C-alpha cells in the first residue's frame, strides 16, 4: 500500500513538473496545441483502459490506477486552450472556446469534478458505482466535445 501511494505521489510530481515546463512554452500556439493534444491522448488512453476493464470484477486495481491518472490529468489541458491562436492550425479545438470562455470553463470544470469523483469512487472498489461515475465522466466529455470541438 505504501509503494502504491509513493508511486502516485511520484506521478503527480512528474505531471506537475512537465506542466510547468509546458506552460513556459505556451507563448507559441503550436506548443500549446501539442501539449493539449498530448494530455488528451493520455486522458483518452487511460479512460479507455477503464472502459475496457469495467466488465471484469477482477480488474478493480487496473480501474483504480487508471481512474487516478484520469483525475490527475483532468485539469492539465485547459491553460493550453486559452492561448490565442490555438484554435487554428493542427487542432480540432473550435474558436467557440474564445467566444464562450465562461461556457467552456464551466464544461471543463464539470469534467474535472466528474474525473476527480471517478478517482475517488474507483479507489473504493464498488464496480456498480464506478460504472455509474464512468458514465457521468463520459457525458462531460461529450458535452465539451460537442460544443467546443470542430470536426
Image (cartoon, helix red, strand yellow):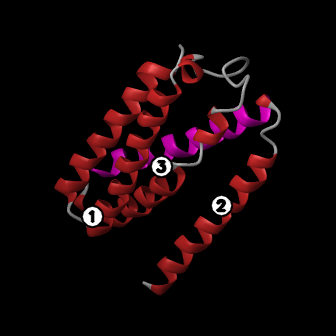
Q: Nearer the viewer, residue 128 or 28?
A: 28
Does residue 112 appear to the left or right of 20 in the view shown? left
* Category of crowding for the residue at label 2, using alpha-carbon neighbours closer than 10 angstroms: few (below 14), some (14–19), many (at least 20): some
Disc on the earlier residue, 1 or 2:
2
What secondary structure is found at the residue carrying circle 3? helix
Q: Which residues are magenta?
A: 30-55
Q: Quadrant of the N terminus?
A: bottom left
- Where disc 1 sits, the SS reads helix
Mark 2 or 3, closer to the camera: 2
Q: Mark 1 highlights which residue?
A: 58
Which residue is label 2 attached to? 16
Where residue 74 is drawn, which disc sits there? none
Residue 65, given in percent of the width and then of the height, sits at 43, 63
Give above or below for 108 relative to 73.
Answer: above
Tell me the distance, in whole angstroms, between the alpha carbons under discs 1 and 2. Answer: 31 Å
The secondary structure that most of the magenta stretch takes on is: helix
Against 37, is 132 above or below? below
Residue located 54% across and 15% down the image? 150
Mark closest to the chain's N terminus, 1 or 3: 3
Question: Marks 1 and 3: CB-CB under 8 Å?
Answer: no
- Dividing the picture into quadrants, the one containing residue 96 is top right
Residue under pointer 3:
46
Residue 67 or residue 81, whichever sits in front: 81
Q: Position of residue 149 (x, y in %)?
A: 52, 21
Spatial CA span between label 1 and label 3: 17 Å
* Whole-percent x, y for residue 132 in the image: 21, 47
Residue drawn at 33 percent across, 63 percent down: 120
Q: In this rendering, does residue 55 appear at all?
A: no
Q: Is residue 126 left or right of residue 70?
A: left
Residue 89 locus on image (x, y percent): 73, 18
Amino acid at each position: 500500500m505504501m509503494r502504491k501511494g509513493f508511486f502516485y505521489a511520484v506521478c503527480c510530481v512528474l505531471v506537475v513538473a512537465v506542466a510547468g515546463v509546458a506552460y513556459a512554452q505556451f507563448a507559441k500556439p503550436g506548443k500549446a496545441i501539442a501539449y493539449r493534444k498530448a494530455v488528451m491522448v493520455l486522458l483518452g488512453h487511460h479512460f479507455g483502459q477503464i472502459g475496457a476493464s469495467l466488465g471484469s470484477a477482477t480488474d478493480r486495481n487496473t480501474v483504480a490506477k487508471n481512474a487516478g491518472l484520469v483525475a490527475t490529468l483532468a485539469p492539465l489541458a485547459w491553460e493550453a486552450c486559452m492561448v490565442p491562436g490555438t484554435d487554428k492550425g493542427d487542432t480540432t479545438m473550435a474558436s467557440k472556446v474564445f467566444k464562450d470562455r465562461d461556457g467552456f470553463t464551466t464544461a471543463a470544470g464539470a469534467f474535472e469534478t466528474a474525473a476527480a469523483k471517478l478517482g475517488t469512487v474507483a479507489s473504493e472498489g464498488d464496480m456498480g458505482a464506478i460504472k455509474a461515475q464512468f458514465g457521468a465522466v463520459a457525458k462531460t466529455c461529450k458535452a465539451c466535445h460537442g460544443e467546443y470541438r470542430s470536426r
